[in-house]
Image (spheres, rainbow, N blue to C red):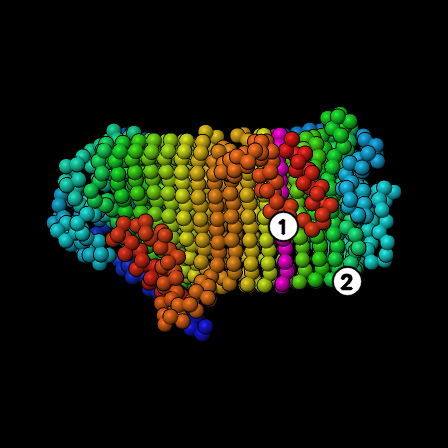
Amino acid sequence: MNNNNEILERLTTEVYEYGFVTDIEMDIAPNGLNEETVRFISAKKNEPGWLLEWRLKGLRQFQQGEMPNWQNFEMPAIDFQGISYYAAPSKKAKYNSLDEVDPELLATFEKLGIPLNEQKALSGVAVDVVFDSVSVATTFREKLQELGIIFCSFSDAVKEHPDLVKKYLGSVVPYTDNVFASLNAAVVSDGSFAYIPKGVRCPMELSTYFRINAKNTGQFERTLIIADEGSYVSYLEGCTAPMRDENQLHAAVVELIALDNAEIKYSTVQNWYPGDKDGKGGIFNFVTKRGICKGVNSKISWTQVETGSAITWKYPSVILRGDNSTGEFYSVALTKNKQIADTGTKMFHIGKNTRSRIISKGISAGQGNNSYRGLVQVGIGAENARNFTQCDSLLIGDECGAHTFPYIESKNSSAIVEHEATTSKIGEDQIFYLNQRGIATEKAVALIVNGYAKEVLNQLPMEFAVEAQKLLAISLEGSVG
Amino acid sequence: MVKQITNTLFDQFIADFELRSLISASAETTELHTLRETAFEQFKQIGFPNTKVEDWKYINLTPFLKEDFITEPGDELSMTRDEVIAKAKIKNLDAYSIVLVNGQYLSALSDTIPGEEISLSSLSAATNQPSFKAHFGKYIPLDKNHFAALNTALFRDGLFISIKDKAVVDKPIHIIHIVSSDNNLFLQPRHLFVMGAGAALQIVESFISGDSSAMGGAKIFVNNVSEIVLGERAKLQHYYIQTGNENTSYIHHTEIVQEAYSLYNNYKSSFPGTGLLRNNLNVSLNGEHIESHLYGLYLAGGRQLIDNHTIVDHLKPNCQSNELYKGVMKDEAVAIFNGKIFVRKGAQKTNAFQKNNNLMLSKKAVVDSKPQLEIFADDVKCSHGSTIGQFNEDALFYLKARGIGEEKAKALLIHAFAYDVTEKIPIPAVKAYINELIEEGLK
């Protein structure tokens, strides 16, 4: 197959289409991290004392913490004093309506294809937009309010619903969890907050769109979603960043809480700037995501499509505490050029009859390295726990790597735990079969990859599935192994 | 250094080494002496592993190392030797018996293997042999293997087997390792088997310990290291039958290096008894068209801890490896399986498979399974699977409905579960013996 190299060449030089920079007036905190920075952020946001206290605890923890060394990649040296921890569009602290938003900003989101304008918005998606550190707009707030659903920026939630925030903040991911969680606690800038009251089925998709714009900043947002008894919510998250030569750090924390009979579906399409083809620049995506199925019969489902970032390093997890609760994890991770992904999930079975399902599809191309790392832990009281794990890797080109590191720990004899993994390239016989039927090699590969990822893509809400499929297609169409 | 367990034993080894170093300097070749020195420096740096070390995550060694040990075995054997040997004999197995007591090869108790093609002796008597010089201590990375480093620095003796090119040994060699002591003993045997190009051999190794009541409750810690080299087209069928009493702890490191077109089959079976059993089985496929098969069966009972770590390292293209480990868990036993497959860059057309199944018979048994793949080549077929489960209720019901009692039905199902491994054993006498041990272990 002669055109292999050609196609690989094209694949590895694919241009990142969201790499533009928005020229907008910004309020940026000076570089460096110390108690002053934390107080500065807190003051800037008019926060109550308890939150500042919590931030400072996080900071102290961070200063004591050591960088982990177990990951399957060379840990880049991050100069934490060289980053600015706060950047926000400076125009106005709070927008009352979209008319007040900087037109430059609106244009940016127009370019990204994010419908901020409610009239034009796709009906059925409420969007919260986080630009650098600050939430700039949340659509459909009123409509949701009628149902009692709270969907706003994290800062607004602190002001308007302090009891809820105080009760749940850090209850799933405490500031002591890991160094990046501590850092996030110290300098959390903004994020999204959603509360679905008892018995309410959220009528539209809730969505947050993250955009890093400013140079030399990190983004540290916090998402907190609480689904009260018998409620349901589907939440989407998308992200992009400009092309820059230096690496930027994104250390977010997401906490999900599902009470009795509640269900949360969380989907991510991650397309941060992955760096250029020599591995220069790109986002370090070090995120802590965890949900707890607190109540009986509750369910949390993570779906992620990871195509961006220089390094993706995250393990969206579920603590299955309530009896009969269910955790799911669906992932497609694509690495090309010199991208690295070390991702997977953790499922903690604590309650009785808990079930979990893990489907992970890794695609490595170019010199990319893709690792699945997962933990399935069955506690001593988790009677009849059930887990099924499947993680497959697809290799395209002979310079990439695919790795699987599952950890399976069972302390209960009634548990049934299954794990299986395969690694292979696209079968020549499969391509031959399609060729024979008049489908060109390029198309055949696209078809096979699409089929390979289908199980995961199917889990995404419709609008996102389209975006995700497009994303995969951009990178993979025609990549003959 | 945070990573090490420091205890009196650690200090004792430092003192031991200084003493031994003096003897070694005069009695052993300079190469060996230097190797011991480097290995010991390494061990001094890394010490005994604690649970922060990824490969030792699930084992806390502290309780196993807290005793006062002597490191020089005495001569006594608590049981009369004939009795012990009789116990280790495999019925109907026509083989050359080789006996090692506390790591020391005893020619008086062993059969002599006729012919010029095979040379078998104690390791200490072989240090001037060319195959010893060519291979000894060359393959184990000491910076990652705490116990192998300690062994290399301080091993006393062991068994050396070297087979000439194209030699075929007519009968299996049955190596009986006996450990027994009246005092707490820390043993460090070391073995080297070198096979010439085209040679073929079957080795059955039995590990037994003396009667625990006769030993008066003395604890024995064995840190065993074996190195095995297969030349081109060599074939080795290798059996491990691991039994022992609850006062013995075994760290068992086996490093295998294979050259092109060679075949290595390992059949490992472990049974209730030994308190701690840690197997490191590492195979390097260093040539093209190599085949390796690793079959393991562990039946864990009591408060036993069985830990199987394997590494299959595909360095060259066109090789095949296959690994199947099956575990039956009783009582409060803990089993760990950690299988790693590496496919190095350029090792195209590799087929590598790995599977670990666990059958839980008891509520309190614990299994930690970590099957891992690390792949740096694209034209490969690799897969792994791992399951933890119980008896199939339907199968049990089916048998009971046909008038088979619960106990018997369960035994039948366990045998069927183990069959995937036992059926692979080519020597009928060994197969029958292992089935017997399963029967006994289930009681």
Task: Tell me the kind of residue under disc 2.
Answer: Lys
Residue at image point 39% right, 53% down: A333
In the rendered image, the residue lying farthest to the front is: B402
Mark 1 burial class by Cα count in 10 Å: few <14, some 14-19, many 20+ = many
Q: Which residue is at a point 43% across and 69% down the rendered structure image? A: A432
Say if the magenta span includes residue B293: yes
Q: Residue flagged by tag 1: what amino acid is it?
A: Leu
Q: Nearer the viewer, residue B430 or A90?
A: B430
Say yes or no: labels 1 and 2 on the same chain. Answer: yes
The disc numbered 1 marks a residue on which chain?
B
Q: Where does label 1 land, which residue?
A: B294
- Point out residue B116 in the picture as x, y percentages from the top left corner: 85, 58
Q: Which residue is mark 2?
A: B166
For the magenta stretch, what is the residue range? B286-312
Upstream in sequence: badge 1 or badge 2 = 2
Q: Is residue B394 left or right of residue B153?
A: left
